[in-house]
Structures are given as C-alpha cells and as structure tokens.
Amino acid sequence: AAITYELIKTCKQTGARLGRVHTPHGSFDTPTFMPVGTQATVKTMSPEEVKEMGAGIILSNTYHLFLRPGHELIKEAGGLHKFMNWDRAILTDSGGFQVFSLSELRKITEEGVHFRSHLNGDKLFIGPEKAMEIQNALGPDIMMAFDECPPWPADEAYVKQSTERTSRWAERCLKAHARPDDQGLFAIVQGGMYPEYRKQSAADLTSMDFPGYAIGGLSVGEPKHLMYEMLEVTTPLLPTNKPRYLMGVGSPDALIEGSMRGVDMFDCVLPTRIARNGTTMTSRGRLVIRNAAFERDFGPLDPACSCYTCRNYSRAYLRHLIKADETFGIRLTTYHNLYFLIDLMRQVRQAIAEDRLGDFKEEFFDRYGLN
Ligand SMILES: CC#C[C@H]1NC(N)=Nc2cc3[nH]c(NC)nc3cc21
Ligand SMILES: [Zn+2]
C-alpha cells in the first residue's frame, strides 16, 4: 500500500498517539503539522528551508492548481514533486472546500459541483472522478476524497443530505482511484455538528477501508468547544491503525487539544498568513512585531526558539523590515511561525512518549497566556 501507519504508543495521560506515517516520498512522525503550499509553494519559503525547519510533508490544493497552471501542465512537468522541487511527502486537498470558500458557487448536483473560476469567471466542474483525475496528474502521496462541504451553520436536513452524498462520492473516488500503490486516498468524515451524522459518516467511510481518514467540516467558524466535542465523537470511531487528519487546524492550542483527542495530522494557513502582517507566534504568546515597544528591542523574536530567524535577527530589525514592507521581513516571520508549529509538534510527541501531554498542555498554556 502507498500509505501505512505505524502506531508506536498511546499516551497514558490522554488519548494522544505517537506514530509514524510511511509514504513513497519518505516517512514522518505524528502528531505532525503540515505547512500549506496552496499554489505549489509554501509562500516565500524555498523547499530547502521547509526541509531545514523539519517538515516531512506539505499540503497543496487541487482547486487552485486545476485553475492555474492546470493539472495537465504539471503532469507534463513530471508531477507536483518535480514541478516544485520538493522530494518529501505531499498531500493535496480535493477541491471541495475551496470551491465552496472561493468560487461563486453555481450548482451542486449528484454528479458534482458546477462553479465559476474565482480568477476569470470560467464555468467549471469538479466531481469525484474529476477530482481523482486531477490528483492523479499532480501525483501527491496522499489524495483527499471529493466531499460536499456544507457551510456552518447549516440546518440538520441539509447536513444529513450532504453527509450522505459525501459517502456516495467517497465510493466513486475509490472506484476512480487509478494508482492505489503509489497514492493513498483519505476519506473525509462529515456530519456537521450533529453527533448522529458524524457517527453515520464514520461508519459509512470506515466500511470502505481507506488508508487514512480526515475529519472535515470543522474549523469552519464554529466555537472551539464544539470542534472538540465533534472530535470526541468521531476519533473513537476511526481505526487505530490508520492516520487521522483534522483539516484546517490550527492554532497552537487547537493542535495540542486535537492531539489529546487522537488526531495525528494537522494543516493550517495561519502561520504563513499572519506572518505577512508581522504577527508571530512565540512561546510567550502572539507578538505583533510592528508594535512600537519593539523599536529598540535588540533581542531575539523568541528567546526560547532556536530557528534561523531567532538566532540571527533582532525584534528591532524585524520590525523595521515589516514596517518598510521588505519581503525579507515576511520571509523571516514566515520561517519562524512555521518552525514554531513544527517544533511545537516535536514537543507534543516528546510529551506523549513520556506520558505527560496533559502536563505539557498546562505548561504551554500558562506560558502562552491561554490559562
Ligand atoms: C465542510 C468541510 C470540509 C473539509 N473538506 C475539505 N476537502 N477540505 C477542508 C479544508 C478545511 N479548512 C478548514 N479550515 C481552515 N476547514 C476545512 C474543512 C475541509
Ligand atoms: Zn524562531
């Protein structure tokens, strides 16, 4: 099989797991944070820098690459790994969520979704088979099934209908899966904020035996306690010998809380997105580098961080670059933010190994200002 999961141990203090995921482009330890490279680049970072900070897998997007430059072009280039010069693992999202969050939605049918390109208004269509064709051409190690993404909030009847459709679409994705030995296909559990539909979705999808399962429909604007409640309903229904991937999460607290509830993989645009306006995550909480307080602060961004940015530049210099709109400033804050989350997950794995993730959470929350 293209993707296998090795469960190393379960934390005695929480429901967290220590594991390893093996892919055709190398293995990575879990729980893990996946940097997002939506348009075939982790914004402003070189592949060497993403490797240096310790990322074993990055995420890219079917929707964006289908619209531009096109999946056939990338296939001609030798696939996404070759195109972007990244030789470790890649996971691509299937486009369902991006169609709903980016394009002027036209129509959802049993066949798939008809929509207009958010770039030039072209009338386009993606359904399960098309999403599999695109991901087959891009060549990621992990592909996501094409799901119907209900907005939040959505009424119960709508969630029921779309969850059942997502199960039917998952089956169609399995049938359209051309290269199961080279690419793993993860199903996406839906069900909104309704435990009964979460259970139904998990039952439908685990009966089809996928190499991994994503939990979708969360981090869509709901309160965090609701996200955690849905995790508590869903992860116990997923097989223990397969990876669980919580889509679109997240912030440092959510990464720790999600790990405690048995999630193995996370992705989020937060670290790269907030870096662009100079907002950074540090061991002592968020730090907005534009703040006048840092004008003459010649110390490191985060004294507790050993990343390239924190070892070589001061807060005063970073503040100057961001205020001067210098691209190098965004590169330095991006590097640090990504490193911060990747290193956080390293500490989470260490805590699981020592059966003290609950204690680590309290220590981290105290320092970060979350308690
Ligand atoms: C409804 C639904 C759903 C999920 N389906 C797919 N394919 N991708 C996702 C990406 C996400 N990003 C965030 N938050 C930033 N939530 C997400 C949820 C999904
Ligand atoms: Zn740093």
Image (cartoon, rainbow, N blue to C red):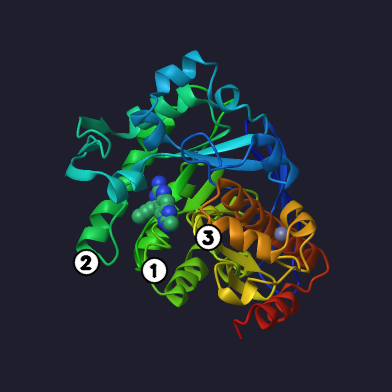
The crowd level at tag 3 (other Cα within 10 Å; few <14, some 14-19, many 20+) is some
Residue 323 - label: 3
Residue located at (52% from left, 23% from top): 179
Q: From mark 3 to mark 1, how far is it between C-alphas?
A: 47 Å
Q: Is residue 317 left or right of residue 111?
A: right
Residue 233 visible in this rendered orientation of the protein: yes
Q: Is residue 208 left or right of residue 193?
A: right
Vertical arrangement, residue 54 with respect to residue 280, above or below:
above
Q: Position of residue 355 (x, y in %)?
A: 79, 71
Residue located at (83% from left, 68% from top): 354
- CB-based contact (under 8 Å), mark 1 and mark 2: no
Residue marked by disc 2 = 155
Residue 220 - label: none
Residue marked by disc 1 = 195
Q: Is residue 285 left or right of residue 11?
A: left
The amino acid type of the residue labelled 3 equals Lys
